[in-house]
Amino acid sequence: MKKLSISLLLLLLTLSLSACNFNDEVDEEAPVILEVSEIQREFVEGATAPNWATYITALDNIDGDISILSTMVDTDNVDMDTIGTFDVIYTVEDEAGNITSFTITITIIEYTEYTVGPVQ
């Protein structure tokens, strides 16, 4: 019985230690931000802003996929009611504190109303 107890104790100790991360490697690599393909970059003035968080994905070498939250998206200078170009700035941080930024430039164009009538 004593041998069984010692064997179980050694097994538990081994499993506990194998679950620990003894990796002394320091994560100094920032996450990579990728733009989603086929995103809309041009909007008519007065249009509703899209969910900017869906425009990118982020991947980290240690943390894996990073969920994009609205707090990571800076649209302070974007005015959907003003014609011009504006930058949407993304800032993503991994668990180790490595930060990367990415900018997407959008364009707001003038709304033009077309009237369909009889051909003359």
Image (tube, rainbow, N blue to C red):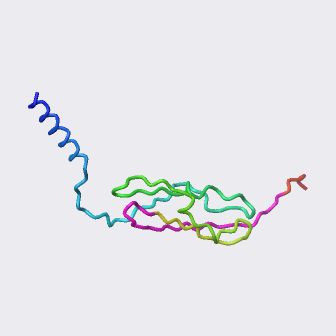
Residue sitting nearer the eye, 41 or 74 = 74
Q: Which residues are magenta?
A: 93-114
Residue at (32% x, 67% y) in the render: 28
Q: Is residue 97 left or right of residue 69?
A: left
Residue at (72% x, 59% y) in the render: 47
Most extreme residue toward the front is 2
Residue sitting nearer the eye, 59 or 72 = 72
User: Residue 69 appears in which quarter of the rendering?
Assistant: bottom right
Most extreme residue toward the left is 3
- Magenta-drawn stretch contains 38: no
Image quarter of the C terminus: bottom right
Q: Residue 30 placed where, x, y %?
A: 38, 65
Up/down of 4 relative to 76, above or below: above
Q: Residue 105 placed where, x, y %?
A: 58, 68
Residue sitting nearer the eye, 63 or 12 = 12
User: Residue 55 appears in which quarter of the rendering?
Assistant: bottom right
Q: Residue 59 placed where, x, y %?
A: 41, 56
Residue at (33% x, 56% y) in the render: 62
Q: Residue 17 placed where, x, y %?
A: 21, 47
Residue at (55% x, 68% y) in the render: 89
